[in-house]
């Protein structure tokens, strides 16, 4: 098949969206398909385009067999409603323009959302190329933005909801990445076109790498609790900082946060104001060495705020941790909790419940055998159920079935 894959976020940017996109695309290439990705100049989450892309509109490169076309976007370090809209809408336009000039035919236009407006580009290009349109839904937008308090303009919300349902009606197939998203889409009347291709992990990349980095960080004598990912609003980082502050009295426990995001400056400020000497803040690191950092930890936290929206969430970082044979402290209820408990790969704590989280940390600190048991169980579970290679095969079958209709 010839697949035109639209994703605003893509490596070298780091994140769950970028990882899913490149691993799905590269695995499809390995299966003999031609995949062309339309994405932005790298800038997320800092909002700064690197110098090598300055004064350019489009760049083409070959990455892991994928033809990648990067185009200009309106990226800014300051994040507010207007800069975000400029960011999303500029990608919508440059993506549509770039795709319009690509020669040749395609079997599928595959657009992954959010960002929300990628659907406009996907629909335009599918009509222009006279081909199938597949819309992947990783997050229900604008519902999620409303629930998190990021969107409150009623007129804009109503307009966005109409556009959202227009995407669903016009799509030839809808890919849901969690069972919760699938259920909501089915409840809206789209059962006949919804397919599920769950999140997962690259079990070849993510594996137990040993604890060499723990030595490099000077934390050999410490019980290391790691959070690696977006330092954002949804993760409840302020509450995690409260846990760090309360556990200062436990001199053997040390926290490490890795990543970038809109509330990182807030975390820096809290660290300074409360003298959190038991917390190390690191910048984001390349995806290829994230397994080394996960393996250097004794346990890893996967948090989200207490919100009904996240009952259907299935964070991919949970599978990354399990693949590295480390126990997960999961602060996400619903679908993710069910998976974790089925895998017997960690401890669930109520979202935003600091007491339960501290209790879970202490339980794992005091029980090395339990940590090893959970780590081994997690690795076995993801190998059997959540390898990205397996998920790419599932996606391939959906696309083959669609194009053969």
Image (spheres, rainbow, N blue to C red):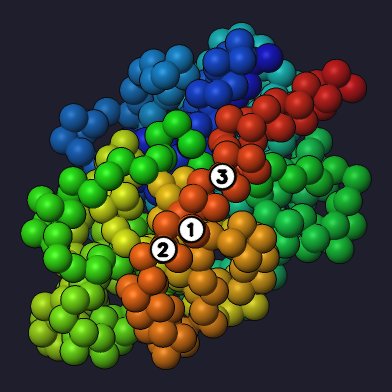
Q: Is 264 positioned to the left or the right of 175 in the image?
A: left
Query: Which tag is nearer the camera, tag 2 or tag 3?
Result: 2
Q: Is 204 positioned to the left or the right of 186 in the image?
A: left
Residue 9 makes an appearance in the image: no
Above or below, comparing residue 356 to residue 237 in the picture: below
Q: Which residue is mark 1?
A: 373
Kindly identify the residue that appears in the image at 21 percent across and 34 percent down: 54
Q: Which mark is residue 369?
A: 2
Above or below, comparing residue 24 to residue 308 in the picture: above
Mark 1 in CB contact with mark 3 (< 8 angstroms): no
Residue 279 makes an appearance in the image: yes
Q: Which residue is mark 3?
A: 380
Helix, strand, or loop for circle 3?
Answer: helix
The span from disc 1 to disc 3 (Cα, nearest Å) is 11 Å
Q: Is 86 positioned to the left or the right of 260 in the image?
A: right
The span from disc 2 to disc 3 (Cα, nearest Å) is 17 Å
Residue 280, quarter of the rendered image = bottom left
The span from disc 1 to disc 2 (Cα, nearest Å) is 6 Å
**Residue 230 image point, x, y percent:** 36, 60
Helix, strand, or loop for circle 1?
Answer: helix
């Amino acid at each position: 098949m010839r697949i035109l894959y639209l994703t605003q976020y893509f490596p070298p940017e780091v994140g769950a969206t970028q990882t899913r996109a490149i691993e799905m695309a590269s695995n499809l290439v390995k299966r003999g398909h031609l995949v062309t990705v339309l994405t932005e100049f790298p800038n997320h989450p800092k909002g700064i385009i690197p110098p090598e892309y300055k004064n350019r509109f489009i760049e083409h490169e070959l990455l892991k067999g994928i033809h990648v076309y990067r185009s200009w976007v309106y990226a800014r370090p300051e994040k507010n409603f207007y800069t975000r809209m400029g960011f999303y809408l500029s990608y919508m336009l440059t993506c549509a323009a770039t795709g319009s000039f690509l020669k040749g035919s395609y079997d599928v236009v595959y657009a992954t959302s959010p960002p929300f407006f990628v659907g406009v580009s996907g629909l335009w290009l599918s009509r222009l190329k006279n081909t199938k349109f597949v819309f992947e839904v990783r997050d229900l937008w604008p519902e999620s933005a409303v629930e998190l308090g990021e969107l409150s303009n009623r007129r804009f919300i109503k307009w966005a909801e109409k556009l959202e349902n227009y995407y669903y009606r016009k799509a030839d197939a809808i890919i849901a990445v969690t069972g919760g998203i699938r259920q909501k889409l089915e409840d809206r009347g789209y059962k006949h076109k919804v397919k599920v291709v769950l999140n997962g992990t690259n079990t070849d990349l993510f594996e137990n790498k040993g604890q060499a980095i723990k030595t490099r960080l000077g934390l050999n004598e410490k019980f290391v609790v790691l959070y690696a990912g977006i330092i954002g609003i949804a993760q409840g980082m302020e509450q995690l900082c409260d846990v760090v502050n309360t556990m200062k009295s436990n001199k053997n426990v040390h926290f490490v946060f890795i990543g970038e995001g809109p509330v990182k400056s807030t975390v820096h400020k809290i660290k300074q104001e409360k003298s959190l000497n038991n917390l190390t803040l690191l910048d984001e690191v390349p995806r290829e060495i994230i397994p080394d950092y996960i393996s250097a930890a004794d346990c890893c936290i996967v948090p989200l705020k207490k919100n009904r929206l996240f009952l259907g969430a299935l964070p991919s970082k949970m599978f990354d941790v399990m693949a590295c044979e480390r126990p997960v402290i999961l602060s996400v209820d619903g679908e993710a909790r069910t998976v974790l408990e089925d895998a017997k790969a960690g401890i669930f704590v109520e979202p935003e419940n600091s007491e339960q989280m501290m209790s879970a940390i202490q339980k794992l600190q005091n029980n090395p055998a339990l940590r090893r048991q959970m780590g081994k169980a997690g690795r076995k579970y993801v190998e059997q159920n959540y390898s990205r290679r397996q998920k790419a095969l599932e996606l391939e079958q959906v696309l083959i079935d669609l194009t053969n209709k």
